[in-house]
Image: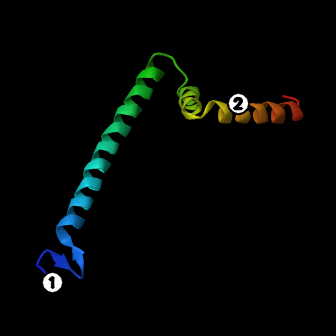
């Protein structure tokens, strides 16, 4: 067993994976802060952030999935007399 291997694990390779994940986690945290900032800016200009978040979520969906969800929601609202 070489010095770089501990218990059959290549320590250098393991360390590289861990460090990559750590860097990505840092980038993710920075991006989340940027997203919060954009929502705060939108709120400051009068937009409803809750609705804005919902629109962003809907735009991520496949068109057919979004249409199906909207149809089900319409059906439920109709059944409840809304």
Q: Is label 1 in a helix, a strand or a loop?
A: loop
Tag 1 residue:
1
Query: Eyeballing the image, is 57 above or below 8?
Result: above
Residue pictured at 35% horizontal, 32% vertical: 34
Q: Position of residue 14 (x, y in %)?
A: 24, 66
Judging depth in this view, the residue of 2 and 29 nearest the camera is: 2
Q: Residue furthest left?
A: 3
Residue pictured at 40% horizontal, 32% vertical: 35
Residue pictured at 21% horizontal, 65% vertical: 13
The way the protein has been coloured in the rendering is: rainbow
Residue pictured at 82% horizontal, 36% vertical: 76
Query: Eyeballing the image, is 10 above or below 24?
Result: below
The number of discs equals 2
Q: Residue furthest front?
A: 1
Judging depth in this view, the residue of 69 and 50 nearest the camera is: 69
Q: Are marks 2 and 1 in contact (CB under 8 Å)?
A: no
Q: Is residue 74 left or right of residue 60?
A: right
Tag 2 residue:
67
Q: Position of residue 66 (x, y in %)?
A: 66, 32
Q: Residues within 10 Å of mark 2 (few under 14, many from 20)?
A: few
User: Of discs 2 and 1, which sits in the foreground?
Assistant: 1
Q: Position of residue 10 (x, y in %)?
A: 21, 72
Snapshot quadrant of residue 6 = bottom left
Q: Is label 2 in a helix, a strand or a loop?
A: helix
């Amino acid at each position: 067993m070489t010095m770089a291997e501990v218990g059959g694990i290549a320590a250098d390779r393991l360390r590289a994976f861990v460090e990559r994940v750590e860097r990505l986690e840092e980038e993710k945290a920075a991006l989340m802060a940027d997203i919060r900032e954009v929502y705060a800016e939108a709120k400051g200009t009068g937009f409803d952030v809750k609705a804005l978040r919902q629109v962003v979520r809907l735009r991520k969906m496949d068109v057919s999935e979004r249409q199906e969800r909207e149809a089900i929601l319409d059906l439920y609202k109709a059944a409840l007399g809304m």
